[in-house]
Image (cartoon, rainbow, N blue to C red):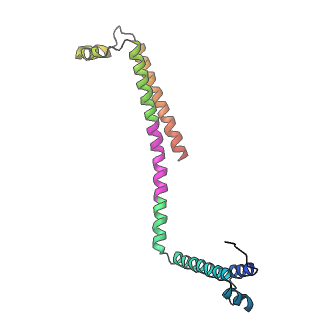
Amino acid sequence: MIFRGCSYEADVTEALKNGHWPEGCAPELCSHAETCVRCSDLVLVTQTFQRARNESILAVREASPSLLWWRAQLRRRHTATERLARPITIAQIFALFVNLTVGIVFLAWQYRHGLRWETWWSDLASTRVVHFFSLGSRDLSGIVLATSAVGMVAVLSGIVLYLVYKKA
């Protein structure tokens, strides 16, 4: 099969593109397009696509204003929800980080002391709990370390929340 171009094809294409077909073009061009298979197919396909395009443009223009308003409201709510959820997500990630850090430090401390977890139950007797919290001759380094850790977590939480709400 050999495809040969038509010498009038460029003129027909230009007339169709500019919207001059068939009223604004020469009569010999119209008569040629009726006899030439290639040019008649070009006219048929181009006019079909132009009609479909014009119909779709009219369909879009007939959209309901209430539908546009509803979409705008939906987009506004979605944006507001994302803005409100971002600080909460950041605070949750920070809390997860703090909890994981405390858990890792606890496991490392327990591993260093020999992992005697079964003795915990016997240590939880009421007299021992009261004795643990009394400030007798007990070493205060553990209490100072725990107080410092709680203070550090409180300060870091405040800084993170300040930075999150400052950006929002």
Find the residue positioned furthest to the front. Answer: 1
In front: 34, or 119? 34
Q: Residue at x 46, y 37 (%)?
A: 93
Q: Is residue 160 magenta?
A: no
Placement of 84 over or under 54, stated as above or below? above
Placement of 41 over or under 95, stated as above or below? below
Q: Residue at x 51, y 39 (%)?
A: 162
Quick check: 100 left or right of 134? right
In front: 13, or 133? 13
Residue 45 location in percent, x, y? 61, 78
Q: Residue at x 55, y 45 (%)?
A: 167
Say whether residue 130 is visible. no
Find the residue positioned furthest to the bottom. Answer: 27
Quick check: 165 left or right of 143? right
Q: Residue at x 46, y 64 (%)?
A: 73
In front: 154, or 5? 5
Residue 143 location in percent, x, y? 40, 17
Find the residue positioned furthest to the top. Answer: 137
Q: Quadrant of residue 47?
A: bottom right
Q: Is residue 91 magenta?
A: yes
Principal secondary structure, stretch drawn in magenta:
helix
- Quadrant that contains the N terminus: bottom right
The magenta segment: 77-93
Residue 41 location in percent, x, y? 63, 80
Say whether residue 158 is visible. yes
